[in-house]
Amino acid sequence: IALRGPFADQDAWQAAKSRPPHRFTPEEVLGWTSSASLPLLPSDESIAVFTRLRRAPRLDRRAPGEWRARPDTELHATSDKALMTFDPPSTEGLWPVFKGESFDLWQNDLGPASYYAWAEPGPVLARLQQKRLNSGRSRRDSAHAEFPPAHLRDPATLPCHAPRIVFRDATNRTNQRTVIAALAPPRVFCGNQAPYLLWPAGDTKDQAFLLGVLCSVPLDWYARRIVETHVNFFILNPFPIPRPPRSDPHWQRAVALAGRLACPDARFAAWAEAVGVAYGPLDAAEKQAMIEELDAVVARLYGLNPDQLAHIFDTFHDWPTEADWAAWNARRDRTVAILRGLA
């Protein structure tokens, strides 16, 4: 497969015709997505950046000794509707049911006005326990089938009892951000609009690392080349995710930054302790500085150079006002400067 462009005008096309196209084998293209789709790139220079990002392994890679994450859904808006309450006179004793708009980047819980519904935990926990037992026994491709039977039989191991990575299903490549992921608090159910990640292998530090990558600008730039309206599982699973060894100082820094950003209050105290970070609110300036450093660290783990990271920022989004562009370019300059220091 040979790729050129896209080109904005005839002059750009004429200038590029004499240069050889970027060529990819069918095996490479088939590895980009599960549907053999080609990326929508903003410029000819984007091909080299896309290729660099795609050198990272797929999210769904299964290898001995490595973490393993698989997307799953919990409550379905139609088939599980009877288990949910949409306008309860009191929410005492009920658990929230999250939808995609219930969280945002580094904002774990946007409050009751954003919830999809409420649910009495007893019947829902029983439903989820039976559902995963049936799924683990009957479907070879089920994420639950990768867990040992003792784990599946223990209701205390249901994912809703602990913090977990959730992401928005509905999105758009033209939004300000395309991949919206967060660490949901415990004692929360997730509707099908908010899928979550199961972990057949890996620990809380692996979760913090993956969350940091999913919330980064480099990964989001990649997603914008592929995503149209939904982050379907067949789109999410081939996402390129770096897998450095734990001895890598950039992996360690990504874990520390993402872990701290993900823990704004005491609901995440146990998870934060397992990662080795503090929890609690962050000053706005400190939080923004950590987000920008995380973007630079993730870019370093992808093997991007400063010019490539600058290209990602420059082609990321069409900001509507000059003030938006100025703020975004200032963020670009700070992030690229951090990357230069890392390199």
Image (cartoon, rainbow, N blue to C red):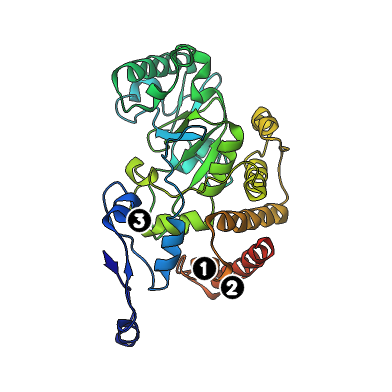
Badge nearest the viewer, 1 or 3: 1
Which of the labelled discs sits on residue 326, or is there none? Answer: 2
**Foreground label between 1 and 2:** 1
Name the N-terminal-most of marks 1 and 3. 3
The residue at 62%/53% (across/down) is 294
Residue 97 appears anywhere in the view: no
Question: What's under tag 1, amino acid-wise?
Answer: Gln
Between the C-alphas of marks 1 and 3, the distance is 19 Å
Give the residue at mark 1: 308
Mark in the foreground, 2 or 3 = 3
Q: Position of residue 213 (x, y in %)?
A: 53, 48
How dense is the environment of label 2, judged by Cα within 10 Å: few (below 14), some, or many (20 and up)? few
Label 1 crowd bin: few (<14), some (14–19), many (20+), radius 10 Å:
many
x 38%, y 22%: residue: 145
Q: Give the amino acid type for the residue marked by disc 2 in the picture.
A: Ala
For marks 2 and 3, give the CA distance. 27 Å
